[in-house]
Amino acid sequence: MLKREVLRGNSNFSAVYNKGKSFGTKYVVLFLKPNNLTYSRFAYIASKKVGNSVKRKRAVRLMRESYRLSPLKIKEGYDVIFMARNTIDGCKLEDVKKSVEISLKKSKAISNGEV
């Protein structure tokens, strides 16, 4: 059974990249686009510029955990892509969490009661 909160498909990714907005920080770039659904879909990616497969997987885990621990959450009805920059290699969770929170604040798509 597939989780509905996971963004999938090349067409969905292309739509977020081409029609969405981006918010960059030192370690993470946040891409955001409304999706007209009652829930938000997330994707965490790291390109080969980040490093080998071990470094890319660590970057994805850091971003996922940073968003999970963050008190700031995205409103319902958005497609969200967290993309790791190559500077994320060797970073601590606290640094990535701070970077994720800054990009979330820049996006102004934070749910009510969470700021």
Image (cartoon, grey):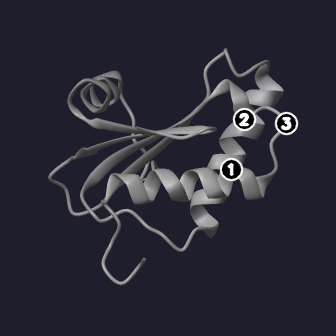
Q: Is residue 72 above or below residue 77?
A: below
Q: Is residue 107 above or below residue 72?
A: above
Pick whichever, 25 or 44, lies toward us.
Answer: 25
Q: Is residue 27 above or below residue 76?
A: above
Image location (x, y in percent) of residue 4: 38, 53
Q: Secondary structure at mark 1?
A: helix
Image location (x, y in percent) of residue 53: 77, 23
Q: Seen in the image, is 90 located left or right of residue 62?
A: right
Marks 3/2: CA–CA distance: 6 Å
Residue at image mark 1? 96
> Which label was assigned to residue 39?
none
Q: Residue at x 43, y 67 (%)?
A: 73
How packed mark 1 is, by other alpha carbons closer than 10 Å (few <14, some 14-19, many 20 or more), is many
How packed mark 2 is, by other alpha carbons closer than 10 Å (few <14, some 14-19, many 20 or more), is many
Name the outermost residue toward the bottom: 113
Q: Amino acid at mark 2?
A: Ile
Q: Secondary structure at mark 2?
A: helix
Q: Seen in the image, is 110 located left or right of residue 85?
A: left
Q: Amino acid at mark 3?
A: Gly
Residue at image mark 2? 88
Q: Secondary structure at mark 3?
A: loop
Mark 1 touching mark 2, by CB under 8 A? yes
Residue at image mark 3? 90
Mark 3 touching mark 2, by CB under 8 A? yes
Marks 1/3: CA–CA distance: 10 Å
Q: Amino acid at mark 1?
A: Val
Q: Residue at x 24, y 58 (%)?
A: 77
